[in-house]
Image (cartoon, grey):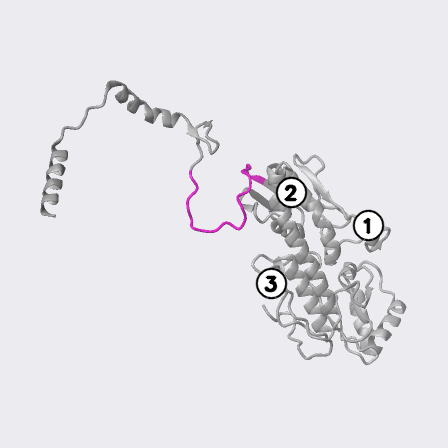
Amino acid sequence: MLAKATNSATTTAHAATARPALPTLPAIVLLALMPLAQTGCERSPQGKDAPPSTAAAAPDTGEIPRWPPTPAAPARTIVVTSPVLLDAVRHIAFTRLPSLRVELLGDSPANEVLLAADLIIALDESLEPRPVPVPADAPARIARIAPPDATRLITASSNPAPGVHLDPSLWAELLPAIHAALVSIDGGTPEAKAPYDAGLERYRDRVSTLGSYAKKVLGTIPSDPALIVSDEPSLEYLTRGAMIEFVALPARDRPVVRPELAALAGRLAERRVPAIFAASDHPWAAALAEMCRSLGHEVRLVPLGFVRTLGPEGTPEAAYAGAIDSMVRTIVAELQGSVPVRRFTSTHPMPPVPSAGESDRAGPAAGR
């Protein structure tokens, strides 16, 4: 064993003192040219020469992407004409928002926003709760969103009433048209379309669930059918299909005709309806409350928010689902129905709805 170790050490010493062989001239030239060849071309995954890359490497943040990277596209600006459309675009294009700038026309100077727009998405003017005029000569393409089946809309003076979004089932039918407009801005290729498909499927499913939830909660209002009186005609969209009789008050500028109110006041008093949904300064609502009082029945005048717009940013009502939920909870609480403790949101499962007559009446703000 000792001899073997000595021979090994002697061999190692000779190897260490051996003079290395000098490279030949062709080898020196080849070594000098290799860095230039590497910077002149890169090898593609298929093994073919590719032009040099000029894109900076993306920083490694350690985060798992929510969706496989979408095809690179230049930043685009989309202008929408209502908060409800803004909410829909944000949900359908949720994976593309880093490369999409979405602006609400009413939030900024119109000319500046329109000049920067690549696409303008607007509801058909007959359906817009708060019409925003879009110049016909706007430089961007205008995508007008119209209902696929106008026969299902409430009509007034032979025109569809604004506020179609108050019926989630009808609003869900408009979402594919919004999706198509968004796909077109990215070229319409299958690769560009895939993220929008996922956003549409998820948002449409949530809106449909919201419609089922709203009708179920409204169905807890006592009396069959329940009676809802409001100064907002489009509120009928929300109450359809829920065994509710809806009565819209005439417009403010129409002179009050007291005989027209007598029969309605009698019905409110007979059925002990505790509230009507109207502003206190609405002349017809004030006259109706006074007439009910003369019959020995008190009714509250409750203004209903979020019929024509959504809530401010940072509140639950800033989202479409939150605004609908807030209106439903207010109506049901005022008419002595059963209000779910937990709010409806865009991401969580449907809240459990108490049965009619249960004491779970936490009020419209419960669950915030």
Q: On the picture, is 262 further left or further right than 194?
A: right
Q: Earlier in the sequence, mark 1 or mark 3?
A: 1
Vertical comparison of 342 with 108: above or below: below
Q: Are marks 3 and 2 in contact (CB under 8 Å)?
A: no
Residue 73 in picture, x, y percent from top left: 55, 37
C-alpha span from label 3 to label 2: 26 Å
Vertical comparison of 235 with 32: above or below: below
Residue 110 is inside the magenta segment: no
Q: Is residue 87 visible?
A: yes
Q: Residue at position x 70%, y 79% from top?
A: 358
Q: Which quarter of the figure has residue 275?
A: bottom right
Front-most of 49 and 355? 49
C-alpha span from label 2 to label 1: 23 Å
Q: Are marks 1 and 3 in contact (CB under 8 Å)?
A: no
**The magenta stretch spans which residues?**
57-76
Dot 3 lies on which element? loop
Which of pointers 3 and 2 indicates the residue nearer the eye? 3
Q: Earlier in the sequence, mark 2 or mark 1?
A: 1
Residue 235 in picture, x, y percent from top left: 76, 61
How many labels, in total? 3
Dot 1 lies on which element? helix
- The residue furthest right is 259
Check disc 3 and report the residue beneath it: 348
Q: Which mark is residue 182?
A: 2
Q: On the picture, is 235 further left or further right than 188?
A: right
Q: Amino acid at mark 1?
A: Ala
- The residue furthest top is 25
Q: Amino acid at mark 3?
A: His
Dot 2 lies on which element? helix
Q: Which quarter of the figure has residue 302?
A: bottom right
C-alpha span from label 1 to label 3: 32 Å
Which of pointers 1 and 3 indicates the residue nearer the eye? 3
